[in-house]
Every structure is written in C-alpha cells, then in structure tokens.
Amino acid sequence: MTVFSRVLVLAVAVSGNAYADSDLPNFAFGLGYGLLTEKSLMNIDFKVNIPINDYLSTQVLLNSNYLVTGSTKDSFAQSELSSNWFLRNEYGRLGIGLGVTELEPMNTSQDSERDIIGQFLGEVFLGSFSLTTNYISADTTLSNVTSSRIGISYYFDDDLRTSLYREKYNIDDIGWRLEAYYQPKKYHQMGSVGIIARTGDDYDYFGAVVQYYFDYAVSLKQREREFH
C-alpha cells in the first residue's frame, strides 16, 4: 500500500468521525480522460469536504494522473495529496493548503520525484458570477482539479456552469482553460459531467470528467461554493 493510499484510508476514517459530531461531510469521486498533446491522460480524483462550522471547513484531496504515451520513456503517474482549510461566508472564501506531490516514471530505471506543495485559494461570489484565484507552488501539474489560475465563472442556472481561466501548467507554460459542468436533477443531483479544453505553448488538452457525490441532493452552485 502506497503512502497516498494509507493517508486516504485515514482521511475517510477521520471524516466518519466528523459525520457523527458535526455537519454532514461531502464526498466526491471523479474520473477523467482526455488527450494531452495527442497523448492519453487519465485522472482519478477523490475529495472529502468536512464542514466544521458556518465559517470554517477543511478538505482532504487526492488526485492521480496517468500520462500514457505508448512508451515507458515519457509515460508517468503523478499523485497529489493535500489538506486544505477554508474561511467562507456568503460573499466568498479564502483557503490555504499543504500537501505532497509524487511523480513516478513508468520506466523503472528512473527515480521517482517527491515534493512538498503549498496552495492559496480565493473566490468572490457576485450573484451568478464567481471570481477565482488559485496558486499552487508545484512546478508542474496536470490535474483537472488543481493548478495555478485566475478566472471567472458564470452559472446559467443552479446546475450549469461555464468558466474561463488564465492558467499555469508548469514553470514555463501559461495558457487558457475553458470548461463547462452540468449536474442533472434527474439523478437527484448526485453526479455531474464536465468538458475541459486547455491550450498553451507546451500543452494542449481536451477531455471530459464525470463526478459522483456520496452525500445528498444539492445544486451544483451551492455545492461548489460551500465545498470545493
């Protein structure tokens, strides 16, 4: 069992205690697939959001990316495990986080790389609009969930959002990200689908993501503003 798996099991156990003692936690599981400059990129994401009170919440986030190129020379798996803390109210939220990222080449002759990462997250709510900024200290990130970005989101209704970000993929590559998410009411608002397109000097990406929520029916707008 890897270090990420062990911490994930611990996170689920801790969230179980929070369920009994405080407000209801929010669990989210996501699967993504797309083409990163004509190479297959798969994502597996797991989040545990734990409300503490009306103004403070915490989150455990595990992201895994698998870049498959057809050759072990440049194929790799990248994992990120982080803990984030948020102060929030009806006008927005601020968050900080600390975690570890690990890059493991498919070529067993190459060494794995591990690094400590820090995050700062901020969001302002303006009716149907949200202004977002996010900084992550990692030099390279391929995740659909975390990257350094600044941008704007618009909710067409409570269950349909589109966003445009100016995003940093790695230390040298700056580009644009356009995404749209929809959460159908037909399935009790327990899942959502998203389309993501990114373009930059080094990386172009187009893909889709499906998310499932292990909790209760709540609109996409409320889910994304109260959780993360």
Image: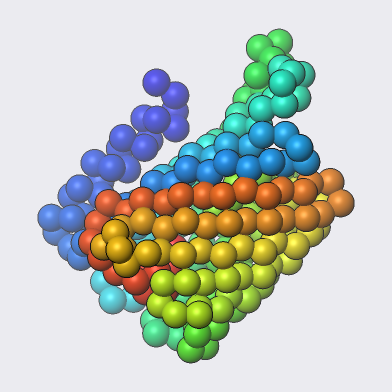
Coloring scheme used: rainbow
Position of 113 with respect to 84 (left or right) is: right
Instruction: Give percent across and percent down for residue 91.
Output: 45, 86
- Name the one closer to the observer, 92 or 28: 28
- Name the one closer to the observer, 118 or 215: 215
Quadrant location of the C terminus in the rendered image: bottom left
User: Can residue 87 be seen?
Assistant: no
Which residue lies at the image location 69% right of the left edge and 61% below the top edge?
177
Quadrant location of the N terminus in the rendered image: top left
- Most extreme residue toward the top is 109
Please tell me whether residue 126 is drawn above or below residue 142 in the rendered image.
below
User: Can residue 67 be seen?
Assistant: yes
Which residue lies at the image location 18% right of the left edge and 50% below the top edge?
17
Instruction: Give percent across and percent down for residue 103.
Output: 63, 31
Instruction: Give percent across and percent down for residue 159.
Output: 41, 72
- Name the one closer to the observer, 1 or 199: 199
Please tell me whether residue 172 is drawn above or below residue 85 in the rendered image.
above
